[in-house]
Image: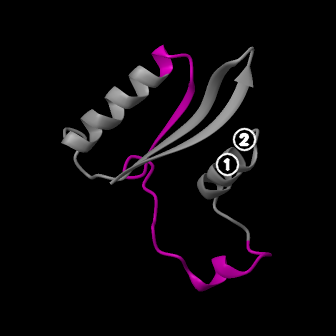
């Protein structure tokens, strides 16, 4: 699975984007990985700020536990990092 989030930031009438590419595939030789690598390379060459998140490499746990639902829950550091990255994007 492959997702990309785009957040525009105007700079002298040229759009520089902050982009999060989120990849979830267990085989790092897969076509999905090739697409993600190509997308990141091309976007960076075009002057965009790109962050690649390979959820398998990060050992991301997709299961939401009951304690995480509370707004007072302490988030694991990797989840907090992802949340901060999304919140910090200029709109």
> Looking at the image, do the residues carrying marks 2 and 1 touch, with CB atoms under 8 Å apart?
yes
**Position of 1 relative to 17 (above/below):** below
**Pointer 2 residue:** 89
Q: Residue at x 60, y 85 (%)?
A: 66
Side of 8 where 59 appears, left or right: left
How many discs appear?
2
Q: Which numbered tag is attached to residue 86?
A: 1
**Position of 64 relative to 78 (above/below):** below
Q: Residue at x 46, y 58 (%)?
A: 60
**Position of 18 relative to 1 (above/below):** above
Pick whichever, 21 or 65, lies toward us: 21
Secondary structure, mark 2, is: loop
Q: Residue at x 50, y 16 (%)?
A: 46
Q: Quadrant of residue 41?
A: top left
Q: Quadrant of residue 73?
A: bottom right
Side of 9 where 17 appears, left or right: left
Side of 57 where 71 appears, left or right: right
Q: Which residues make up the magenta segment?
A: 44-73
Q: Which residue is farthest bottom?
A: 66
Q: Position of residue 43 (x, y in %)?
A: 46, 24
Secondary structure, mark 1, is: helix
Pick whichever, 6 or 59, lies toward us: 6
Pick whichever, 2 or 61, lies toward us: 2
């Amino acid at each position: 699975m492959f997702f990309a989030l785009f957040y525009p930031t105007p700079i002298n009438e040229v759009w520089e984007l902050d982009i999060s590419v989120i990849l979830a595939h267990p085989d790092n030789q897969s076509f999905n990985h090739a697409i993600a690598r190509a997308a990141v390379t091309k976007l960076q060459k075009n002057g965009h700020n790109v962050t690649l998140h390979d959820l398998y490499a990060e050992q991301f746990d997709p299961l939401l536990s009951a304690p995480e639902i509370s707004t007072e829950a302490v988030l694991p550091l990797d989840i907090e990092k992802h949340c901060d990255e999304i919140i910090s994007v200029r709109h």
